[in-house]
Image (cartoon, rainbow, N blue to C red):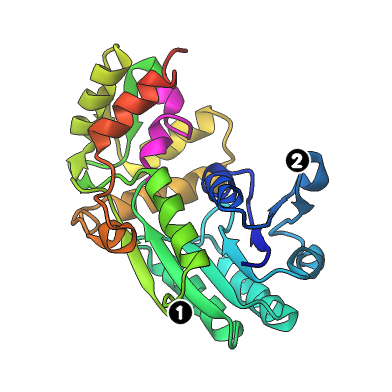
Amino acid sequence: MGTVLVTSGTGKTGRRVAERLAALGVPVRAGSRAGSRAGGVPFDWQDESGWAAALDGTEAAYVAYYPDLAVPGAAGAMAAFGRVAAASGLRRVVLLSGRGEPQAAVAEEALRGACGEVELAVVRSAFFAQNFSEGALLDSVLGGELVFPAGSAAEPFLDIDDLADVVVAALTGDGHAGAVYELTGPRSLTFEEAAEELGRAAGRPVRYVPVSGPAYAEVLEGFGVSGPEAGFLAELFATLLDGHNSATTDDVKRMLGREAKEFTAFTREAARDGAWHG
């Protein structure tokens, strides 16, 4: 296969996708704002001027929009990227999207409508399990209090390694044009149940503290997140975690021929790798 551009190539999902492609012998071009300093090429979602150069000579692209496809302006960025991708002769795109996010679906359609003959597959993900081990909730786990606006809703947490495997399969295999995959873990847990499992694996008590969206926005602002961004994130989480995403799917198994990783297995592996030694 020809060269693959991995946008957000130093992020949680992009890094894993790039590593897997390289292991398969696929030429990878990791795009990030750091560019050559990070061993890749310049790619900034806020600066369209560099997209054509990043796509030049590539055959496929993994698109992970930062910070989220649901933010204002994401649909416009997807339409612009689609036009540049089509003009560059790109053959295939795999887009990371959010499961059950109405505004993310609008951005998906904007990309689909702009990329012409480019093959597009969409991967909609459940809440990442790794948010507890290397993401925004790591400090909460380390501090013993998981403060979050999820109420009593259950979520089928997805291991990012499974996501990366599915993305690579869609990038390197045929038959995925037009497909939409909804990826979840094999079991839904409430955040209270997840906190108990995290505590057992980490060897420290972890308590779930449910809060309202506005209260969570105040928590985020206390950590230095700007008011508008904190409000957006709190509203997004409260919307996504109202129970409508609780059902599991078998799309990971359909794509990979194996079950998705269980949350308990994730916590044990993360603990073994030192995620919560801080």
Left or right: 99 with respect to 21? left
Residue type (three-letter) at the residue carrying disc 2? Ala
Image position of 181 with respect to 84: above or below: above
Label 2: state its secondary structure.
helix
Residue at the image position 35 percent from the left and 60 percent from the top:
99
Q: Which mark, by number, is residue 177?
A: 1
**Quarter-of-image position of residue 46:** bottom right
The residue lying toward the viewer, choosing from 244 and 164, is 164
Q: Which mark, by number, is residue 138?
A: none
Image position of 81 with respect to 23: above or below: below
Residue at the image position 26 percent from the left and 52 percent from the top:
258
Rendering coords of residue 131 (x, y %): 42, 37
- Mark 1 surroundings within 10 Å by alpha-carbon count, few (fewer than 14), some (14 through 19), many (20 or more): some
Magenta residues? 128-140
Q: Of callouts 2 and 1, which one flags the residue occurring earlier in the amino acid sequence?
A: 2
* Total labels drawn: 2
Residue marked by disc 2: 38
Residue at the image position 53 percent from the left and 48 percent from the top:
20
The residue lying toward the viewer, choosing from 217 and 179, is 179
